[in-house]
Image: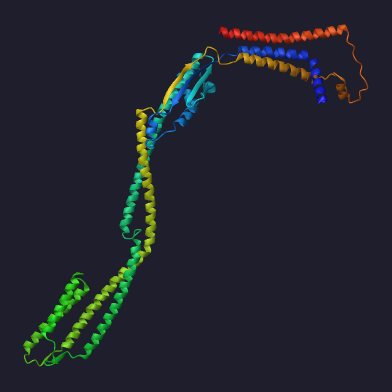
C-alpha cells in the first residue's frame, strides 16, 4: 500500500513540474469551449398533450354484438406512424418546410432533421400522450406540433372506419365464394344420393339383410323347382301306364267332378289375385287348367251326343293325369321364373353390397366438405352482421374520444442548449485536459523527483543522497511561482464565473 502511495505521489510531483503546460491547455480549452457554447443557436420546444378516452358507455352494452377493435394497439401504432415518411411529408407541406428544399438531397436531409426532432411519449398516465418538437423558430415548432396533433386525431378517427369498410368488403367476397362452394357441394350431394339411393350410410345394412333374405328365397325356390320337376316326371310315368279310353262302364269321372275341379281352381285364382296380378305365373297356369277342363267337358258332352250307346269314353284317370301334368308343367314354369327372378335379385344385391363401403366413403368425404363450407358460411354471416353493426356504431357514435388537454405551447425560454450546464462541463473538461497534458508530458520527458525514481531509472543501489539547502531567495521564488500559478488558476475560475453571469444576464434579457 505504501509503495502504491509513493508511486502516486511520484506521478503527482512529476505532473507538478509541468503544471504551467496544464494551465495553458486548460485556458485554451475553456476559451474554445465557452465560445462554442455561447455561439450555439437556441432551440425552442413546442409541446401539446392529448388524451384518448376509450372507455365509452356503449362498449359494455355492445359487448359480444359488435367487433371490438383493439383501440389501445391502434393508438400505439398511430403514434409510431406519426414519424413515418408519408406523415413527415404531409407535415412538411402543412408547415411550408418543403418550400426550402430545392433538391432531393435537401428534401431527404429536411425529413431526417424533422424526424429527429419530433418526440411522442406517454405523459405518465394511460392514454395520455405528449407531442413535442424543437426548432430555432418557436413559431415553426408550434406549427409542426399543431400539424402533428391534427394528423393524429384525423388518422385515429378515420382508421377504424377504413378498417370496418375493408372488413365488410372482404367478408362479402368470402361470402360469395363460400355460397358458390356450398351450392356446388349441395348439388353434388343431391346427385350422389339420387345415383346411390338406398345405399347411403344407414341404409347399407339393409343390403346385407336383403342379400341374405334373397339367398334364402332362391334356395327355397330351387328346392321347390326340383320337387315340382320330380312330381311332373312321376305323373308322366303314370300317364304312360294308363289307357286313353275306357268303355262307358269303366268311366267314373262325371261332369260334376269336372265342375268341382273348375270351381276349386277358380277359388284358388281368387286367392292369388288378392296378392298378385293376372300376369303372375300361378294365375296364368290356373287359367290354362280351367280352359283345359272346360274343353274336356265340352268334348265329353260332344262324345255322348255322338255315341249315345257309349261304347267307349275317355279314361278319366288318364284325363286327370293329363291335367295334373299340365298343372305340374305350369308349376315348373312358374318356379323357373321365380328362380330366375331371385337369381337376378341375388346378383344385383351381391354387386351392390360390394359397392356399399365405397359409397359410404365417398358420401363421408362429400359431407365433410359440405359441413366445412356450411360452418364457414354461417360464421361469415354472423361476422357480417357484427361488422355491419360495428359500422353503424362507428358512424353514429364516437367509440374513441380525443381530448386536447394542452394545446401547442412554446415557452419563452429555449429548451436547448442548457448553457450553464454546458459551460460547467467545458470548465471541468478543460481542467481535466490540463491535468492529463501535464501528466503525459511528465511521462514523455521523465525527471527524477526522489530517490525511488532514481533507483528505478538506473537499476543501481542508492548509497546516499545530498540534500539541497533552501535559501531565502529560492524560497521567495517558489512562493512567487506558486502565487502566480494560483493566480492563473484563479483567473480561470473567475473567468468561468464571469461567463456564467454573462449567460444569466443574456437569458434574462432574451
For the view shown, which residue lies furthest in the right direction?
Answer: 463
Colour scheme in the image? rainbow
Q: Residue at x 66, y 16 (%)?
A: 425
Quarter placement of the C terminus: top right
Q: Residue at x 85, y 8 (%)?
A: 475
**Residue 406 location, x and y as percent?**
47, 18
Is residue 55 something one can see in this rendering?
A: yes
**Residue 162 location, x and y as percent?**
40, 31
Label count reads 0
- Between 74 and 232, the one lying in front of the other is 74
User: In terms of image quadrants, where is residue 260?
Assistant: bottom left
Q: Residue at x 32, y 75 (%)?
A: 219
Q: Say left or right for 476 vs 245.
A: right
Quarter placement of the N terminus: top right
**Residue 360 location, x and y as percent?**
38, 58
Q: Say left or right for 189 vs 108.
A: left
**Residue 466 location, x and y as percent?**
92, 16
Is residue 95 something one can see in this rendering?
A: no
User: In terms of image quadrants, where is residue 309?
Assistant: bottom left
Residue 278 in the image: above or below residue 249: above
Amino acid at each position: 500500500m505504501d509503495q502504491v502511495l509513493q508511486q502516486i505521489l511520484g506521478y503527482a510531483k512529476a505532473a507538478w513540474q509541468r503544471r504551467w503546460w496544464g494551465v495553458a491547455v486548460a485556458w485554451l480549452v475553456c476559451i474554445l469551449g465557452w465560445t462554442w457554447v455561447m455561439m450555439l443557436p437556441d432551440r425552442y420546444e413546442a409541446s401539446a398533450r392529448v388524451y384518448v378516452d376509450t372507455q365509452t358507455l356503449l362498449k359494455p352494452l355492445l359487448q359480444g354484438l359488435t367487433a371490438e377493435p383493439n383501440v389501445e394497439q391502434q393508438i400505439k401504432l398511430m403514434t409510431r406512424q406519426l414519424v413515418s415518411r408519408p406523415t413527415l411529408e404531409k407535415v412538411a407541406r402543412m408547415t411550408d418546410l418543403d418550400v426550402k428544399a430545392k433538391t432531393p438531397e435537401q428534401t431527404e436531409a429536411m425529413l431526417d432533421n424533422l424526424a429527429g426532432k419530433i418526440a411522442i411519449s406517454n405523459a405518465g398516465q394511460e392514454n395520455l400522450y405528449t407531442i413535442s418538437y424543437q426548432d430555432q423558430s418557436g413559431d415553426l415548432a408550434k406549427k409542426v406540433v399543431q400539424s402533428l396533433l391534427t394528423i393524429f386525431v384525423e388518422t385515429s378517427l378515420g382508421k377504424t372506419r377504413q378498417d370496418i369498410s375493408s372488413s365488410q368488403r372482404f367478408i362479402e367476397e368470402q361470402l360469395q365464394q363460400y355460397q358458390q362452394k356450398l351450392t356446388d357441394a349441395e348439388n353434388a350431394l343431391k346427385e350422389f344420393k339420387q345415383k346411390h339411393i338406398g345405399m347411403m350410410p344407414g341404409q347399407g345394412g339393409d343390403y346385407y339383410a336383403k342379400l341374405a333374405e334373397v339367398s334364402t328365397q332362391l334356395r327355397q325356390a330351387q328346392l321347390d323347382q326340383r320337387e315340382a320337376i320330380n312330381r311332373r316326371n312321376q305323373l308322366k310315368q303314370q300317364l304312360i301306364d294308363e289307357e286313353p279310353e275306357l268303355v262307358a262302364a269303366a268311366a267314373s269321372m262325371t261332369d260334376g267332378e269336372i265342375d268341382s275341379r273348375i270351381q276349386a281352381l277358380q277359388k284358388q285364382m281368387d286367392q292369388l289375385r288378392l296378392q298378385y296380378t293376372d300376369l303372375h305365373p300361378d294365375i296364368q297356369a290356373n287359367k290354362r287348367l280351367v280352359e283345359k277342363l272346360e274343353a274336356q267337358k265340352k268334348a265329353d258332352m260332344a262324345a255322348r251326343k255322338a255315341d249315345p250307346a257309349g261304347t267307349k269314353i275317355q279314361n278319366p284317370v288318364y284325363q286327370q293325369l293329363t291335367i295334373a301334368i299340365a298343372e305340374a308343367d305350369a308349376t315348373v314354369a312358374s318356379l323357373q321364373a321365380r328362380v330366375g327372378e331371385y337369381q337376378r335379385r341375388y346378383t344385383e344385391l351381391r354387386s351392390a353390397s360390394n359397392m356399399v363401403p365405397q359409397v359410404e366413403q365417398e358420401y363421408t368425404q362429400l359431407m365433410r366438405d359440405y359441413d366445412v363450407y356450411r360452418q364457414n358460411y354461417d360464421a361469415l354471416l354472423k361476422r357480417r352482421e357484427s361488422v355491419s353493426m360495428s359500422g353503424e356504431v362507428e358512424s353514429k357514435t364516437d367509440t374513441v374520444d380525443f381530448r386536447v388537454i394542452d394545446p401547442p405551447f412554446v415557452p419563452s425560454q429555449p429548451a436547448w442548449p442548457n448553457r450553464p450546464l454546458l459551460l460547467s462541463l467545458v470548465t471541468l473538461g478543460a481542467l481535466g485536459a490540463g491535468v492529463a497534458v501535464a501528466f503525459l508530458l511528465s511521462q514523455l520527458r521523465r525527471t527524477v523527483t526522489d530517490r525511488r525514481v532514481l533507483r528505478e531509472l538506473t537499476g543501481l543501489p542508492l548509497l546516499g543522497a545530498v540534500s539541497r539547502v533552501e535559501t531565502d531567495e529560492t524560497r521567495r521564488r517558489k512562493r512567487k511561482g506558486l502565487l502566480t500559478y494560483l493566480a492563473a488558476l484563479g483567473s480561470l475560475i473567475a473567468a468561468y464565473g464571469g461567463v456564467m453571469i454573462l449567460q444569466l444576464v443574456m437569458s434574462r434579457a432574451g
